[in-house]
Amino acid sequence: MTGCWLAIDTASDRASTAAGVPPTAAASAIVSGTRRHAAEILHLVDEVLRQAKARTADLAGIVVADGPGSFTGLRIGWAAAKGLAHEHSVPLLAFPALLAAAVGAAHHVGSGAIAVCFDALRGQVFGAVYRLSPTTVETLVAPDVLTIAELAARSPIPPRVAAGDGALRYPEQVLAWTGVVPLGLENLAPGAESLLALVARGAVGRPVEAAGEPVYGRPAEAQAKWEARHGRPLPDPTGHAG
């Protein structure tokens, strides 16, 4: 398939892949459960390329979901995307998974402000607010780790809807803020499909180089515990703190 792009979204509990010529996904696949991401991601890639009648050698580019989001999930998706991009010398772009979910929610409510909240545990969400139209994407609240109250306080206007497992975890707070029952990720098109749509809309993705890393949002639980125990940042593999 000429001009085929591959999209990978593993930022949340719901991992997805899609393949097609943006903005259309000729094929998509989903698996739920973060612990299954590592075992399933390459199978999902193979499946959507087979359905789209494309080969990895045919790819025009790859788009991957950025964070903040699941530390383990992001690492798995980015490893697969970077490996394929390097092997086939194609561009790799990253868009926030929260933005991809907002694009999915826009299919339900149309243009306007949309909040997206992924569950970050500890009473917090990975949250953002975007204002979408058929031709524009405006970030009203940039992705961050927040409580629902903090996200609402930062938003200049109430969103038309809030979506994501984080919104479902705190439904009363979300309903008080938006006046609308939140949408779960299962109610939205797969995030990978929305990533393809963002490529076609001309939204500015983050080019990912070989050494690029996702925006995790906060350290992994194991890193946080190590730093608390030792009282200093965890060194990276090169020996630098970070």
Image (spheres, rainbow, N blue to C red):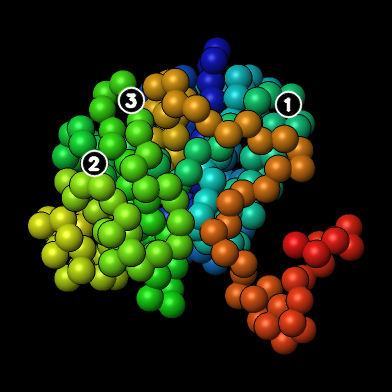
Q: Is residue 30 left or right of residue 234?
A: left
Q: Is residue 175 left or right of residue 103?
A: left
Task: Tell me which numbered mark, 1 or 2, is placed earlier along the sequence.
Answer: 1
Location of the C terminus (image quadrant): bottom right
The reply to whether callout 1 and callout 2 are in contact (CB within 8 Å) is: no
Judge the density around disc 1: few (<14), some (14-19), many (≥20) Cα neighbours within 10 Å. Answer: some
Above or below for 172 versus 114: below
Q: Secondary structure at mark 1?
A: helix
Give the quarter of the image for residue 38: bottom right
List the single residue furthest toward the bottom. Answer: 229
Q: Could you give the CA–CA distance between mark 1 and mark 2, rounded to whole angstroms?
A: 38 Å
Q: Which residue is mark 1?
A: 88
For residue 113, which numbered disc appears in the image? 2
For residue 56, which numbered disc appears in the image? none
- Residue depicted at x 43% and y 77%: 122
Q: Could you give the CA–CA distance between mark 3 and mark 2, rounded to whole angstroms?
A: 12 Å
Viewer-proximal residue among 16 and 44: 16
Q: Secondary structure at mark 3?
A: loop
Q: Could you give the CA–CA distance between mark 1 and mark 3, rounded to whole angstroms?
A: 31 Å
Task: Tell me which numbered mark, 3 or 2, is placed earlier along the sequence.
Answer: 2
- Residue depicted at x 45% and y 62%: 145
- Residue depicted at x 26% and y 27%: 133
Above or below for 2 versus 53: above
Amino acid residing under circle 2: Ala
Amino acid residing under circle 3: Thr
Q: Which residue is mark 3?
A: 136
Amino acid residing under circle 1: His
Q: Is residue 124 left or right of residue 222?
A: left
Q: Secondary structure at mark 2?
A: strand
- Residue depicted at x 35% and y 31%: 137
Above or below for 145 versus 185: below
Residue 114 location (% of width, % of height): 26, 45
